Image (tube, grey):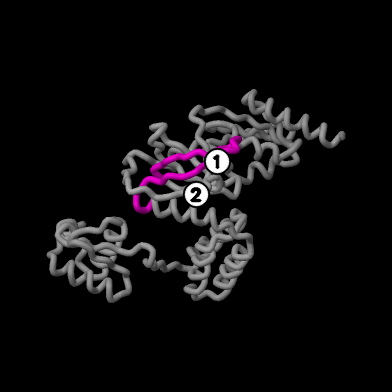
Amino acid sequence: MSEERLASKAARLRWLERRLYNNPQGMRVVDLAAASGMDRRTIYRDLNTLEDMGVPLWQHEGRFGIHREDYLSTVRLNLNQTIALFFAARLLAHHSDEQNPHVVAALEKIAASLPDETIATHLSRVATEIQSRPARRDYIMVLETFTRAWADRRLVRFQYVASGRSEPEQRTVAPYVLEVSRSEPASYVIGFDPLRQALRTFKLERVLSAEILAETYSIPDDFDPYTLLADSWGIMDEATLQEVRLRFSAAVAHRVKESVWHRSQQIIDLPDGACELILRLAGTREIRQWVLGWGADVEVLAPAELRTEVREHARRMLELYQA
């Protein structure tokens, strides 16, 4: 950080606040001074100013830090940015199948801070809608634990019931990122599993209990969750890229062509008004339910395994309705 960029007091305070927040173990004044190019007296004055502004600082054995639990961030949005936030809130309401008090509190605070009464009213309605849903305190505690561990870079030990199993097992993970599924109301942690010595993905709704360990970790510089998930249909990365070819009937072709379903997609118009959607995905497990949702208006052309799975589902459905 150059002295020129920290010339104004406002810029110094923003830098100092951000620096302290992102170092949960705290920092010494001498290190803050060296990183900013400012003298120590200026750093001490700026720390006093932050405290006067209500930033919850702590001091211990020569280190200064911020109490994250009590910290409140400030965001200023223009009208178009506010509408973008409202769309995100509506998607969140559609995605959430239970009450999350942190989501409710965040939306209510944002609504209270907005000057536009119309948008503020709608955001409040979204918060009320989410608040009316059933609450599952165990899940909220698990989410809070993984959130704190991710922010503080600490390992988590947890009891996990894997898909297809009835008994829980103890697992440990270094959380690299928290992610939500676009195809189901579910949240996941992607992180390093010390036992398997590899990246693993865990569904938080399957975690029975979790505790933060004292052991810390570092996220590798080359870890990029967005690149990791770029070839996935949702949250799972099955390593091997496969070409998926789907033929949609003329009755729904226009709906298929209205959206970008995946970054790899290619759409070919067919003479009868139908279309073919071609995708390159890291596995087909997650797209199967989406394909089934189109019913008889889609035919799986490839890969053969996915075609067989969908055909088997269709056979079982036919037997069900014939019965």
Q: Which residue is mark 1?
A: 161
Q: Residue furthest front?
A: 167
| Residue at horizontal 39 percent and vertical 43 percent from the top | 174
The mark that comes first in sequence, 1 or 2, is 1
Give the amino acid type for the residue marked by disc 1 in the picture: Val
Nearest the eye: 223 or 87: 223
Location of the C terminus (image quadrant): top right
Q: Position of residue 301 (x, y in %)?
A: 67, 27
Q: Which residues are magenta?
A: 150-175
| Residue at horizontal 50 percent and vertical 74 percent from the top | 112
* 204 with respect to 252 (left or right): left
Badge number at residue 309 = none
Q: How many neighbours does mark 1 have within 10 angstroms: few (below 14), some (14-19), or many (20 or more)? A: many
Q: Which residue is mark 2?
A: 209
* Image vertical order of residue 45 relative to residue 302, above or below: below
Instruction: Evaluate whether residue 11 shows in this view.
Output: no
| Residue 161 among those drawn in magenta | yes
Nearest the eye: 282 or 50: 50
Which quadrant would residue 41 be assigned to in this image? bottom left
Instruction: Evaluate whether residue 54 shows in this view.
Output: yes
Q: Secondary structure at mark 1?
A: loop
User: How far, Cα to Cα, is label 1 from label 2?
Assistant: 10 Å
Q: Residue furthest right?
A: 323
Give the amino acid type for the residue marked by disc 2 in the picture: Ser
* Image vertical order of residue 223 relative to residue 132, above or below: above
| Residue 24 among those drawn in magenta | no
Location of the N terminus (image quadrant): bottom left
Q: Position of residue 290 (x, y in %)?
A: 65, 40
